[in-house]
Image (spheres, grey):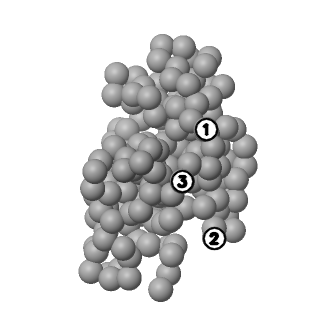
Amino acid sequence: MEAGRLEELGPWRKEQYPFLPKKLVGSPLPAALGPRTQGDVEALRSAIPEGLYQDRLGSYVGVGQGISDHILEDPDKRWDGREQYSPLIPDLVGHSQEIWVGFMRHMDSGRVFLRKRYVKAYEIEKGRVIGLLADEIKGQMMSFDIIRSKDLTGGRLRSGRLLYPTK
C-alpha cells in the first residue's frame, strides 16, 4: 500500500440498516490506556501493539508500523494523543461493535482499494464515551482514529456496507 492520503467513496445509508442502534454505546475499557508520546517517534512506534489479530468474521489483521507511519504522515493533525488508545487495538479488532467495508481512493495516484473498518465505542470515564475506528487494507491496519464526540451516531464511524452485525 502506498503512503499518502485516502478519501472515502460513498457514504453509508442509515435506512439500509434499521436494526442498528442510532447511537453507539460505550463498552468498559478492557485495558489501561497508554502514555502520550508527543514528539518521541520511538515511543510512538513501541506503543503500537504489533501482531496478528482475528476479527469477529474470522479474518486476520496485521498491526504494525503502518499505524505509527499513518500518524507521522501528518503529525500536526494526527499526533493528537490517539496513541494512548493503541492498547485497545486488539479489542477493537476482536470485539468490534460494527465492521464496515467500502472503497477508498488514493488521492495522489487515483488507485482504489477495498477497505474494512472496525468500529467500537468505549466509556473512558463515567458519562464520557469515545469512538475508535481502524481501517484495514489488504490485511494490514493502515489507520487508527479516535472520535471525541458527545454524539456517536455514525458520521465518520459508519461508512460503506455493513458486514457485522447482521440482523
Instruction: Report the Cα–Cα distance between label 2 and label 1.
Output: 26 Å
Q: Which sits earlier in the primary sequence, circle 2 or circle 3?
A: 3
Instruction: Quickly name the residue at label 2.
Output: 57
Q: Nearer the viewer, residue 147 or 141?
A: 147
- How packed is label 1: few (under 14 Cα within 10 Å), some, or many (20 or more)? few
**Residue 84 position within the rendered picture, expressed as x and y whole percent measured from the top left:** 52, 32
The residue at the point 62 percent across, 49 percent down is 30
Name the residue at the right extreme. Answer: 52
Residue at (37% x, 56% y) in the render: 157
Numbered disc 3: secondary structure: strand
Q: Which residue is mark 1?
A: 32
Tag 1 or tag 2, which sits nearer the N-term? 1
Q: Amino acid at mark 1?
A: Ala
| Residue on which disc 3 sits | 28
Under circle 2, the secondary element is: loop
Residue 34 in picture, x, y percent from top left = 58, 31
Secondary structure under the numbered disc 1 in the rendered image: loop
Amino acid at dot 3: Pro
Instruction: Name, please, the residue furthest toward the front.
Output: 126
